[in-house]
Image: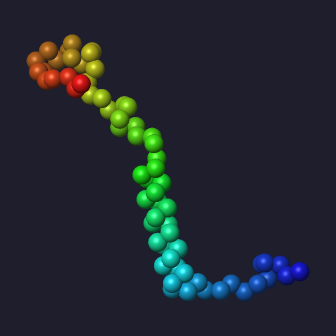
Amino acid sequence: MIALASLPLRKPSALASRLAALMDLCRNRMARFANPYHPERHYMRGPGPKWREKHPEANFDLPR
């Protein structure tokens, strides 16, 4: 039985390294679009009722 640490390391070919880079890019894009968590949809809703009490001169419509 040959130990893996004793085997000589091969230099990856240019095609293999480009393919690995392309796979990383695809994996990152898929993870980005498949992520269901979007904090900006939940936490950044604008000023609340206390802010509106302190700033009565602010005139804007509430989002519906």
Please state if 63 lies on the left or on the right of 36 as rendered: left
Please state if 8 lies on the left or on the right of 58 as rendered: right
The colour style of the image is rainbow
Residue at the farthest right position: 1
Task: Name the image quarter holding the N terminus.
Answer: bottom right
Q: Nearer the viewer, residue 55 or 63?
A: 63
List x then y, in percent, for residue 4: 78, 78
Please state if 36 lies on the left or on the right of 46 as rendered: right
Residue at the farthest top position: 53
Identified at 58% across, 84% down, the residue is 12
Quarter holding residue 6: bottom right
Please state if 26 lies on the left or on the right of 45 as rendered: right
Task: Name the image quarter holding the C terminus.
Answer: top left
Identified at 45% across, 66% down, the residue is 25
List x then y, in percent, for residue 18: 48, 79
List x then y, in percent, for residue 50: 27, 15
As displayed, is residue 46 above or below residue 27? above
Q: Nearer the viewer, residue 41 or 59?
A: 41
